[in-house]
């Protein structure tokens, strides 16, 4: 099973939908959004693409009531978890949060095969040694919106993951 991992869309629906569309074209069956979505309307065009979206919030929460209303209107395609999510796809245990320090800590427990986080606006893929003697993949897709700092443009990045092979690749959109 392939998945699309995005984060930090910051009210920019167009690059988010472009990443979801590209991932779907490459066989992705679900999307994990690691927070800082902000406005629920940012998801409307991505929902229309038909992939299930699993969303956690970040430090830029937006309007939780609007998000819940969109969840109810999404015909089951949108799931909003709050601070973090514990998911299972293709037999893999996945944890999603916004904050890298929480993601790192959870990865160290060895309870999950994959931990996804955001917040830093910097894409990264690593294998974190865990206390069970193995390793956990820790991925941060960076910012799909291309925002690095106020007034500075960063690459619009996202991650395509293959859960069967446990391989992850940072992808870049034109911004």
Image (tube, grey):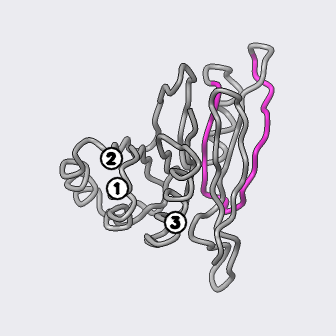
Residue range of the region highlighted in magenta in the rendering: 113-131
* Residue beneath disc 2: 78
Q: Look at mark 1 in the image and give the residue it sits on.
A: 47
Q: Secondary structure at mark 1?
A: helix
Q: Is residue 62 left or right of residue 148?
A: left
Q: Secondary structure at mark 3?
A: helix
Outermost residue toward the top in this view? 132
Q: CA distance from mark 2 to mark 3?
A: 17 Å
- Of tags 1 and 2, the one toward the viewer is 1
Q: CA distance from mark 3 to mark 1?
A: 12 Å
Position of residue 146 measured from the top left corner of the image (x, y, whole percent): 63, 72
Instruction: Work out whether residue 70 or residue 49 is closer to the camera in this orientation and state it.
Output: 49
Q: Position of residue 15 (x, y in %)?
A: 52, 69
Q: Which mark is residue 18?
A: 3
Which class describes the residues within 10 Å of circle 1: few (<14), some (14-19), or many (20+)?
Answer: some
**What's the distance in space between the residues labelled 1 and 2, CA to CA?**
7 Å
Location of the N terminus by quadrant is top right
Nearer the N terminus, badge 2 or badge 3?
Answer: 3
């Amino acid at each position: 099973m392939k998945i699309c991992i995005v984060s930090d869309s910051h009210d920019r629906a167009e690059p988010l939908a472009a990443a979801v569309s590209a991932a779907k074209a490459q066989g992705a069956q679900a999307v994990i959004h690691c927070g800082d979505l902000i406005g629920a309307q940012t998801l409307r065009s991505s929902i229309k693409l038909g992939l299930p979206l699993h969303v956690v919030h970040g430090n830029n929460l937006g309007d939780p009531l609007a998000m819940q209303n969109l969840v109810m209107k999404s015909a089951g395609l949108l799931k909003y978890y709050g601070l973090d999510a514990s998911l299972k796809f293709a037999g893999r245990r996945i944890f999603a949060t916004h904050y890298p320090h929480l993601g790192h800590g959870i990865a160290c427990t060895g309870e999950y095969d994959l931990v996804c986080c955001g917040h830093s606006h910097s894409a990264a893929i690593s294998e974190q040694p865990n206390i069970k003697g193995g390793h956990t993949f820790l991925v941060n897709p960076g910012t799909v919106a291309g925002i690095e700092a106020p007034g500075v443009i960063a690459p619009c990045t996202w991650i395509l993951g293959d859960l069967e092979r446990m391989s992850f690749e940072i992808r870049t959109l034109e911004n």
